[in-house]
Image (tube, rainbow, N blue to C red):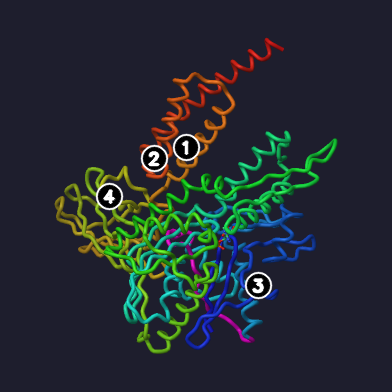
Amino acid sequence: MVIGIDLGTTNSAVAYVDGDEARIIPNDRGSRLTPSVVSITEKGEILVGESAKNQAVVHADRTVSSVKRRMGEATYINLGPRQLLPEEVSAEVLRKLKRDAERYLGLDVAQAVITVPANFGEAQRTATIEAGRLAGLEVLRILNEPTAAALSYAWNRPEAERLVVYDLGGGTFDVTCLQKNETEYLVRSSCGENKLGGLDFDALLCDQLLKHFEKEYGFVASRDALVLQQISEMVERAKIELSSRESVVIALPFMGTGGQPLHLTYEAHRDLFNKLITPLIERTVALTSQAIEESGFSAVDALVLAGGSSRIPLVHTRLGEFLGHRPKGGVNPDEVVALGAALYGNMLAEEQQSNGNGQRRLRDVTSYTLGVEIDNGKVVHVVRRNTPLPVDARRTVTTLADMQESVEVHVLQGEGEDVAANRSLGRFMLSGIAPARRGAARIEVSFAIDEDGIVRVAAVDTKSGRREHVTVRPIKDEQYGDGRAISQRVESLARRIRADIEELSVSQDFFDDIKELLQYSDKVLSAKDESALREAEIALESIVEELIAIREDSEDTDREHA
Ligand code: AMP
């Protein structure tokens, strides 16, 4: 039995195939989703899922959530007295899912297909495989989440279709275009962003609420992890309610220390929430547009939604406006990924049993462009984005000097032709090249990307047979790279300025300049133009400095008057 696992940022799900249909396996509490939360009790017992989530409020220091955002990082996470790598924390979640599946199915489960966001890099994929291994699972394949969702949607539909899968979860956003023919599922394009999802929406709403509490009640949230955890849980619940209601009241009774306890309330409105998340939703729409463009689809037949955050009404509205499509019903966005993973696991098992002659085939694509440095700081691209997997691409390079004995192979990721516009993934030396005149040596550089998306680069001197190789780590968030950090900085500077100009009195001219700059910032934020973002950041920073000076002046004046 092969199980399919959607190892999510917030929640995970596990499924299996019964006959020709995939089904979700409920956990030991009967829930179809299991929170991806791990906690340790005072006695050292590991808790996973709902019980760990419940502990989170009281024992924040002994609880880890959203570990998926840290997969592939070589840093330890504190779980009470223990220090664990992200894959070790994830392994605890997987171990529980495996146990729940075994209990439900009444048999041992040894193999799994585990899903990851499409633009997870090699380090994150390897860490996910390792998490599976630690949990006692043979990971048959790492599958991209939106591909899994598309597979699940298209499974029992005979018609050929061009699908767009929009997958907005707790931590990540992915969009994939997939062409379904009779028995083939071909991914045409895929893009996304690793740190964009429900958690960001929670943070924006939380910001708003804390500002309100400060203004209305003079309440400043302490650094107390317990209080913050409590607030963030209420905010998330309120956000979910806003998907079905226009407004919701968040009440936090008995807050504050010393003196009278404070009873805090905040009414969250959908309109304001929509405004807060608009720049992020616009980013997802722009990425959807990019994926469709890269797919070469002349039209889209169906839009499939996956991930809990795709339930947000603004998502439906914006996609409807943009694509002219209403999302397809009958698909549960929380379950569709795990179901697709189970179907794929079943496909792989059939393929193994029939010696590679399975009835259905799935082909995924790479989500990044890879190349090597050549002369003059230029790059030759060896593997283009959206190349079907597995990839075996080769390119011959040569020496620049007579009798050159070694070359450095510099592996790069990115679309640009100049080295400077790419990211360096690694370098290695190939020495012992057979003596030859410049340009005569033939060094074959090969890129092999397996169906799990793991990249190996090798170089061989065809004459001497000398060979070197490395496994490289494509970098997540390729499109945004630093851009994501810069977007966040621009967003937070803009937020700060907006709050300041509400409070401070500035001259009309200055006010108009600021308004214009803020509009410009919103524009570059949704266009994600990195160089424009840098310009905006510098301009916003200088406004912030001016506003600080104005604030200090006015405080001085206040003091003089006092
Ligand atoms: P996933 O990673 O797919 O499990 O998605 C979890 C994310 O979806 C979390 O951030 C949830 O807060 C969010 N979410 C779940 N249901 C809803 C809803 N009805 N409206 C808005 N967000 C939701």
Residue 521 in the image, given as x and y percentages of width and height: 42, 36
Specify start and end residues of the magenta stretch as a single range.
106-124
Q: Considering the numbered disc 4 on the image, is that residue within a helix, a strand or a loop?
A: strand
Mark 2 touching mark 3, by CB under 8 A? no
* Chain-order first, disc 1 or disc 2: 1
Mark closer to the observer (4, 3): 3
Q: Which mark is residue 31?
A: 3
Q: Is mark 3 within 8 Å of ligand 1?
A: no
Query: Where 360 falls versus 408 (above or below)?
Result: below
Mark closer to the observer (1, 2): 2
* Chain-order first, disc 1 or disc 3: 3
Foreground residue, 277 or 268? 268
Q: Which mark is residue 490?
A: 1
Q: Disc 4 designates what residue?
A: 373
Q: Disc 2 designates what residue?
A: 524
Mark 4 touching mark 1, by CB under 8 A? no
